[in-house]
Every structure is written in C-alpha cells, then in structure tokens.
Amino acid sequence: MVQKDKGAWTWVPVLYFAQGLPYVLVVTVSVIMYKKLGVSNIDIGLYTSWLYLPWVLKPLWSPFVDLKSTKRKWFLGMQLVISVALLGVGLTLPTNMFFTTTLACFWMAAFASATNDIASDGYYMIGLTEKKQSFFVGMRSTFYRLAMVTGEGLIVFGAGFLEQKYGDSTKAWSITMTAAAFLMLALTASNFFVTPKYESSEPKTTEKPVGFFEIFSSFFKKPHIGIALVFILTYRLGESQLVKMASPFLLDDPIDGGLGYTTQQLGILFGTIGVIMLTIGGIIGGILISRDGLKKWMLPMILSLNVPNILYAILALTKTTNIVMVTATIAFEKFGYGFGFAAFLMYLIYIAEGKSKTSHYAIATGFMALGMMLPGMISGYMQEWLGYGGFFVWVVIAALPALLLLQYIEYPADFGKKTKATDE
C-alpha cells in the first residue's frame, strides 16, 4: 500500500484542473460557441440547461463508483471519455447536423465529467490524511478556478482569434474544441503518471451499500426539509437564468438588443476579470461566515448574489456599450455571485449534517444543480418574449422567492463559526 500524501503537491493540482476544465467547457463555453454558430437563444437556454442533468443525478450512481474498481481507474477512464467527446464536438461541427451531434457529445462529456467529480473527490479523501485534506483544499480550489480561467478565458479568446483569422466561426470553433480535446487528453496522461495507486482492485465485499434506500429516504425525513428544498431550488432562480443569457447579450448585435462585443473581448472579460472577482468574493464570503456564522450573513449574501443583476438590466435598457460600464457590471456580478454562493454552500452542508452526511450532501448538491437546470431551460424563452431589457428586469424580480423564504429557514445561529473545539 502506497503511503498517504505521497506526491500530493503534484497530483492535486493536475487532478482538480482536470475536474474543472470539462465542467466549464460543457456548461459555459458551449453557450458561447452555439451563440457564435447562430443557434437561437431559446435553443441555447433549453438544450444547454439539460446538460446540468448528470450533476443532478450523480448521487444515484455514486455508490456504484465507490464499489466497483478503484477511484483512480474511474477518473482516468472518465477523463479519456471526456477527451473523446470533446474531439467529437470538434470533428462534427462542420457537418449539417452539428447541433444534434455536438449536443450528444456534450452529453457524453457531461456524464463523464459528473462521474469524474465523484471519483476525483473520493480519491482526494483516500489519498490524503485528514490534516493534508485541509491543507490542500486551497490548492484544490485554486486549480479548479484556473481551469475556469482557461476555459472561459484562454479557450474562448483563442476561438475569437481564429474567428478573425479565418472569418469562419465554424472552422474556428472546430479547431478550438479539437485543441481542447487534446488538452484534456494531456491532462489524462499526466494524471496517469502522477497519481499513486492507493487502492486495491479487489472487490469491496465488505462495503455493500446496506440500507441505501433507507439513507436516501432519511434525507427527505429531515425536519422542515420541504421548505429547505424549495429554498435550495429558488436561491439562484435569477442567476441561473442570467448565466445562460449574459454571453448572448454581450455577443448579439445592437440591432438585436445586444452589445456587439467580440468573442475575444468576452474571453478576456469573463475568463480573467470575471473569474478573479468570483474567487475573491468566495474567499471573503468564507472568511466572514467562518468568523460570524451563517445566520448573520445569509441575507447580505442573497442580496449580493442578486443586486448586481440590476446592472445588467441598466446596460440592456440604456443600450450602454461603454467598456468601463460593462467591465464593472461583470466584475460586480461575479464578485456578488462568489460572495453569495459561499452562504449557499454552507447551507447545503448544514442540510446534510447528521448520519450519512456524505450521501445527504450529494443529494443536496443534486437539488442545487436542479435549481440551475430548470430555470435555465426557460431563460431563452423569457429573453425572446421580453427582450434583453425586460429579461434582466425579470432576473432581478426572480430573487424575491428566496428572500421571502428566509423567514422560514432554520439553521444554528453559530453555524459556520470557528469554535475553540473545531480549531483544535
């Protein structure tokens, strides 16, 4: 048996970069790509939101990943599948049926990515001692964010450069997605060489999921779980729609109500400034919750998640294309999202507390993904119906259900605070 913590400085960064990259390509970059290829906002909102489904359903097959083979074999296999799926996107883009074929490939990548998440997180807990798990959590988050910068920034910027070079969006994105596939393949190969073999391949006959359905049903027997689930589903009701239409809004021609920005500009704004502000917001949010508890910061954090969306409404209604205003809007929105999402994650941890908290947390995150998927599916219809100005006003209004539910939410007043016991 290989000693725990071996080579963690090498494999933790590569493993979590390989976890973040496919997620951002499937969920975010696909939206930009389809917009540049002339797909309607209705289809973009509907079909790319369906891509969240694997993250909604992953609690259902996570025990299977835990019982069959090893976590290392699972994430290596899934990363290879992701590479093939992304290559499929790149190769089928020039065809007449590109929308159907690329969606099928993104679906394959999404299921593989969700499974890769399960296996990678499991490997992290197996390969590191408890002390090192805490120590490396910052590096894990950092390289996940770097993957987002690479996807939303470098890859999108590269696609924009190729669009200008060839004057052909299809060719540009075909090359870009093919390159992304080879990048993913390189990450898979790196993980093969740097991740130690901590686990045995022997069947885990002693780890049968006894009472799996009881564990599942016990989640729904928690006190006030109905209100909690409605709160989880509505917490990002506005943001889940905005994230689908923000890129189309920036890319659309002014005659169609957009701002007429280029793909390269979008890559710079979202992939660098956006991710930096998102990270800063998350760090500050975590520090404040740790210091003062969740209850004190829940309302300010919900407001921080939603109030910046007003700036998008102002841009759309006034048709402002000024780069300073647009950059400030993206910066405030991303910071607010990172800040507000910290409270959401802590609330999910609270919901999962108790016996079987690992399984219950997986279920809670499934509902979190569902809260992104369902509103995202209608976002294109809402935008087409209301126009960009009306749509972003609607996004602001969509914050009300979560705010109204706050008075019914229960959680320990000191939840999230550092205590002397936990610090030791």
Image (cartoon, rainbow, N blue to C red):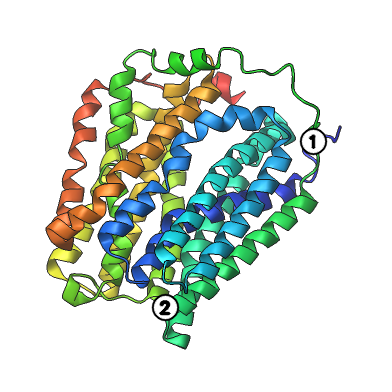
Q: Which mark is residue 416?
A: none
**Which image quarter is the N terminus in?**
top right
Residue at numbered disc 2: 169
Find residue 50 and report its horizontal and vertical position in percent.
38, 47
Number of numbered markers: 2
Residue drawn at (39%, 29%), measured in percent from left and top? 347
**Viewer can see residue 390:** yes
Determine the secondary structure under disc 1.
loop
Q: Is residue 128 above or below residue 254?
A: above
Residue at numbered disc 1: 198
Give the Cα separation between the discs numbered 2 and 1. Answer: 45 Å
Density class for disc 2 (Cα within 10 Å; few <14, some 14-19, many ≥20) is many
Q: Quadrant of residue 100?
A: bottom left
Find residue 47 and report its horizontal and vertical position in percent.
35, 53
Find residue 165 and report its horizontal and vertical position in percent.
47, 87
- Left or right: residue 32 compared with residue 401: right
Q: Amino acid at mark 1?
A: Tyr
Residue nearest the viewer, comparing 57 with 319: 57
- Left or right: residue 174 compared with residue 389: right
